[in-house]
């Protein structure tokens, strides 16, 4: 036989507290305050009741500091609380986390229910939201044409970007007729499709004042809007269903105007920066092109046919100088031999050998002159032949006969079409100039 579980009172109260807290979590409760007490600790203690029952409640200082109303007995309130047990006395009670006036609280409850529903349907999902255009020239505004919101929007646009055109789609933004007005204005703006972005705007107000922007039908219409949509309803602390459905939420109408406009001063500063960067880029490009031009001019001078002709001409001058020097040397040697022979004749003076020697001398002198003439003629012919050969093989002479020299962009000589790919550019040197061409294979 199983032994029964025996609890102490403290254990039982602790178990009951855990069951209540885990079973219920946070709940909303509507009731009337009675027996309200606010001791020096800053905590609030009171009873919530209706016509048939009551429950004790406590709201600690860190939570009640955020409450906008001052509770008092007899007041109808809507609270969000957790169910628990005060273990020392075993009292079943509420720990209140949030408190509102009952009227506003019901609206808030409806707001939270609709918000959860639409969120579960994906109306707030980021993948459905459009980005604002990078260039906005025409802005549509759905709002009251006499309200503060449109004045704020127009003032900001006039100051920041007067070129932006504004089209107003008039609508009531408060009251029972506001929802239908908003739907009609939205439908008209989408049908016309004449603006780059659409703003739904109104100034601040209470939850009741802004309630038309929490309408379920309006939320679906905003979600289906093909135009980029900005919600600018109320003040920064106000959040409506329209804010969650729109592509972009602006905290105020003025902030929405800033989102769709460009500050002229920022634009001018940006233009100055771009102009400065363009000037720097142009200066760097010019310096680079000048350096490249000097480099190619130097390479052209080093490899130009005229340069090679100059080198051959210098070589020819050198050979002619050496030939002239050799002729002078042979002439000098011949003269020395003649002088030596003459001296021997004078020294020996054999009368009978004078005539033969004179004849021999004359022959030698004639042969010497003939040899000198033949050698000079030979060197002149070699010189003329070298000049003619240089003239024949000169690239300039070849170009002058109707031929051309083709080079790639890097200066490489083109000897075969296979050196070029289709569409590649190359330079063509002809007799009277140079031009650029492109290989084009059909």
Image: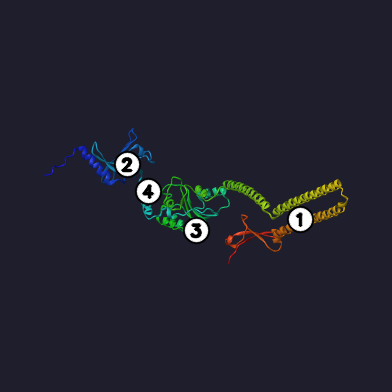
Colouring scheme, one of rainbow, by chain, secondary structure, one colour: rainbow
Q: Of the two numbered discs 2 and 3 on the same chain, state the one appearing first in sequence.
A: 2
Tell whether 337 sits left or right of 414. Answer: right
Number of residues whose C-alpha sits closer than 10 Å to that of mark 4, classed few (under 14), some (14–19) or many (20 or more): some
Asked if the residues shown at circle 2 and circle 3 are in contact, with their CB atoms under 8 angstroms apart, the answer is: no
Q: Quadrant of the N terminus?
A: top left
Q: Nearer the viewer, mark 4 or mark 3?
A: 3
> Which label belongs to residue 96?
2
Q: Position of residue 62 (x, y in %)?
A: 36, 38
Q: Which residue is rendered at x = 49% and y = 61% of the image?
A: 191
Element type at mark 1: helix
Q: Of the two numbered discs 3 and 1 on the same chain, state the one appearing first in sequence.
A: 3
Asked if the residues shown at circle 4 and circle 2 are in contact, with their CB atoms under 8 angstroms apart, the answer is: no
> Nearest the camera: 283 or 372?
372
Element type at mark 4: helix
Q: Nearer the viewer, mark 3 or mark 1?
A: 1
> Which label belongs to residue 108?
4
Q: CA distance from mark 4 to mark 1?
A: 120 Å
> Which label belongs to residue 379?
1
> Which label belongs to residue 189?
3
Asked if the residues shown at circle 4 and circle 1 are in contact, with their CB atoms under 8 angstroms apart, the answer is: no
Q: Nearer the viewer, mark 1 or mark 2?
A: 1
Q: CA distance from mark 4 to mark 3?
A: 30 Å
> Nearest the camera: 30 or 139?
139
Q: Position of residue 234 (x, y in %)?
A: 46, 48
Q: Is residue 139 above or below residue 19?
A: below
Number of residues whose C-alpha sits closer than 10 Å to that of mark 1, classed few (under 14), some (14–19) or many (20 or more): some
Asked if the residues shown at circle 3 and circle 1 are in contact, with their CB atoms under 8 angstroms apart, the answer is: no
Image quadrant where residue 382 sits: bottom right
Residue at the far top: name it: 40
């Amino acid at each position: 036989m199983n032994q029964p579980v025996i609890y102490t009172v403290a254990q039982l109260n602790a178990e009951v507290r855990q069951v209540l807290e885990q079973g219920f979590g946070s709940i909303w409760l509507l009731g009337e305050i009675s027996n309200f007490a606010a001791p020096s600790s800053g905590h609030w203690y009171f009873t919530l009741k209706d016509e048939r029952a009551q429950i004790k409640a406590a709201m600690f200082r860190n939570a009640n500091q955020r409450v906008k109303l001052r509770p008092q007995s007899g007041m109808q309130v809507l609270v969000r609380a957790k169910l628990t047990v005060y273990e020392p006395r075993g009292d079943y009670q509420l720990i209140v986390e949030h408190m509102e006036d009952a009227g506003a609280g019901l609206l808030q409850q409806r707001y939270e229910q609709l918000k959860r529903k639409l969120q579960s349907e994906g109306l707030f999902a980021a993948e459905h939201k459009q980005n604002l255009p990078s260039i906005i020239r025409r802005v549509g505004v759905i709002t009251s044409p006499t309200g503060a919101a449109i004045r704020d929007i127009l003032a900001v646009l006039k100051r920041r970007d007067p070129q932006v055109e504004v089209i107003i789609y008039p609508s009531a933004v408060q009251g029972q007729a506001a929802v239908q007005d908003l739907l009609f204005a939205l439908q008209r703006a989408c049908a016309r499709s004449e603006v780059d972005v659409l703003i739904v705007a109104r100034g601040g107000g209470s939850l009741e004042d802004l309630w038309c922007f929490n309408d379920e039908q309006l939320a679906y219409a905003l979600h289906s809007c093909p135009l980029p949509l900005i919600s600018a309803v109320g003040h920064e602390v106000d959040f409506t269903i329209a804010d969650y459905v729109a592509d972009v939420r602006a905290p105020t109408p003025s902030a929405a105007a800033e989102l769709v406009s460009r500050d002229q001063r920022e634009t001018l500063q940006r233009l100055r920066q771009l102009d400065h960067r363009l000037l720097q880029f142009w200066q760097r490009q010019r310096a680079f092109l000048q350096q490249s031009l000097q480099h190619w001019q130097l390479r052209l001078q080093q490899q130009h046919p005229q340069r090679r002709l100059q080198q051959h001409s210098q070589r020819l001058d050198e050979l002619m100088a050496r030939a002239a020097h050799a002729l002078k040397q042979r002439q000098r040697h011949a003269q020395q031999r003649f002088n030596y022979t003459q001296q021997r004749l004078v020294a020996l003076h054999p009368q009978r050998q004078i005539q033969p020697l004179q004849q021999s001398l004359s022959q030698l002198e004639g042969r010497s002159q003939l040899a000198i003439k033949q050698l000079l003629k030979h060197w002149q012919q070699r010189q003329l032949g070298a000049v003619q050969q240089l003239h024949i093989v000169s690239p300039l002479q070849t170009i002058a006969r109707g031929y051309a020299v083709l080079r790639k962009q890097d200066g490489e000589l083109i000897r075969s079409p296979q050196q070029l790919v289709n569409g590649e550019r190359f330079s063509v040197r002809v007799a009277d100039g140079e031009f650029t061409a492109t290989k084009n294979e059909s």
